Image (cartoon, helix red, strand yellow):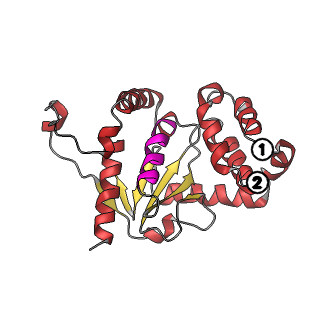
């Protein structure tokens, strides 16, 4: 996403956070009609033909492997919108702990993205992926424009990461292969912005936490038919 788009999205998401409960519990109030609600409707999803190629064994995964619904997120750790979305995605997983899993695919669009992705993969080797992910996202504004991502390293170390071991691991062929494969798929699926979500092979084309939740719920309903 370009910087202006990111700022707009983050502002909208921060406002939405105050009403986050609305995303998960139906409310009796009717939504206000605005200019955007009376425009020509746009598709919410597009289905990919090769759904299985979205998910690879090497990818970080949250939730049960046999969950009936899979969210695939093309994710850039340097992306401010990805950071803003993270609490909403985490809440969906908490709402549906047995039915939904999240698979992350790295998308290296920003300065520092590759280095932090390597830190995350090094953390996965030490069984510290989730705490390190949350730590580096929390301090993202402090390292977002730093090519050495010093604050990300500091946050990872504070989360328990063995830094000496991690600095060796980040240049491993294993991690090189993961990032290379993910960026190949970024081109294959024509990913142009982050985050980009697929739910059971259907791409979310209407951006926002509520459309994502709605697509998850629709996919759950489809699996129960």
Q: Residue at x 14, y 37 (%)?
A: 30
Instruction: Identify residue for label 2.
Output: 126
Question: Quadrant location of residue 50?
Answer: bottom left
Q: Residue at x 22, y 48 (%)?
A: 42
Q: x, y (%) of residue 5?
A: 41, 31
Q: In what element is the residue under mark 2?
A: loop
Q: CA distance from mark 1 to mark 2?
A: 7 Å
Q: Residue at x 66, y 37 (%)?
A: 112
Question: Quadrant location of residue 59?
Answer: bottom right
Q: Is residue 147 left or right of residue 101?
A: right
Using the image, determine if residue 119 lies above or below residue 66: above
Is 179 one of the magenta-colored residues? Answer: no
Q: x, y (%) of residue 109?
A: 56, 42
Tag 1 and tag 2, C-beta contact below 8 Å: yes
Q: In the image as oriented, which residue stretches furthest toward the bottom?
A: 225
Range drawn in magenta: 83-95
Using the image, determine if residue 166 lies above or below residue 3: below
Using the image, determine if residue 64 lies above or below residue 172: below
Q: Residues within 10 Å of mark 2 (few under 14, many from 20)?
A: some
Q: Nearer the viewer, residue 4 or 204?
A: 204
Q: In what element is the residue under mark 1?
A: loop
Instruction: Identify residue for label 1.
Output: 161
Q: Nearer the viewer, residue 55 or 15?
A: 15
Q: Residue at x 34, y 50 (%)?
A: 213
């Amino acid at each position: 996403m370009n910087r202006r788009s990111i700022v707009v999205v983050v502002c909208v998401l921060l406002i939405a956070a105050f009403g986050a409960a609305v995303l998960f519990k139906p409310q009796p109030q009717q939504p206000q009609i605005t200019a955007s609600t009376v425009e020509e409707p746009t598709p919410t999803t597009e289905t990919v033909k090769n759904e299985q190629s979205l998910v690879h064994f090497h990818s970080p995964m949250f939730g049960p492997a046999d969950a009936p619904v899979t969210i695939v997120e093309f994710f850039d750790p340097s992306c401010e919108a990805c950071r803003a979305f993270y609490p909403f995605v985490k809440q969906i997983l908490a709402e549906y702990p047995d039915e939904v899993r999240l698979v992350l695919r790295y998308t290296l669009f920003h300065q520092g993205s590759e280095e932090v992705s390597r830190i995350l993969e090094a953390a996965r080797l030490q069984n510290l992926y989730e705490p390190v992910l949350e730590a580096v996202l929390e301090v993202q504004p402090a390292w977002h424009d730093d090519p050495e991502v010093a604050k990300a390293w500091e946050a990872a170390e504070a989360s328990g990461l063995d830094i000496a071991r991690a600095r060796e691991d980040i240049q491993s062929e294993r991690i090189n292969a993961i990032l290379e494969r993910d960026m190949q798929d970024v081109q294959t699926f024509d990913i142009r912005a982050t985050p980009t979500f697929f739910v059971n092979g259907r791409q979310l084309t209407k951006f926002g936490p509520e459309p994502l939740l709605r697509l998850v719920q629709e996919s759950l309903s489809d699996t129960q038919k």
